[in-house]
Amino acid sequence: MRYVRDGFFAGRQFTDVDDLNAQADHGCCGAAADRRCPDQDAITVRQAFAAETPHLLKLPDNPYPVVEQVAVRSWQDTLRPLR
């Protein structure tokens, strides 16, 4: 969480969730993927993901049903929502 909070969210602006997701996808496929893998110093995150990909399960065809959505505010440095 700290890497994402400090390296991605800090100072970033986005217009909506789709914009945020596009920025996150760009960040994950760019410089973040080329950094050294924390658990295996000899390879990059991109290389670790490529080796892991054949073993990942396919996502289900039906989306998860979301019945209730609640907008909340939170402090920048916590994950605890404020109501």
Image: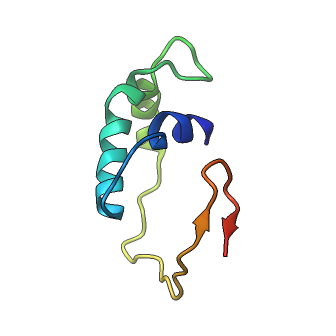
User: Which quadrant of the rendered structure holds the C terminus?
Assistant: bottom right
* Residue 11 figure quarter: top left
Answer left or right for 36 relative to 21. Answer: right
Residue plotted at (45% across, 20% down): 35
Residue plotted at (50% across, 18% down): 36
Colouring scheme applied when the structure was drawn = rainbow
Residue plotted at (49% across, 33% down): 7
Residue plotted at (52% across, 40% down): 4
Q: Is residue 80 above or below residue 6?
A: below
User: Which quadrant of the rendered structure holds the N terminus?
Assistant: top right
* Residue 28 figure quarter: top left
Q: Is residue 56 above or below residue 31?
A: below
Q: Position of residue 21 (x, y in %)?
A: 35, 54
Q: Which is nearer the eye, 7 or 52?
A: 7
Q: Position of residue 9 (x, y in %)?
A: 47, 44
Q: Which is nearer the eye, 78 or 60?
A: 78
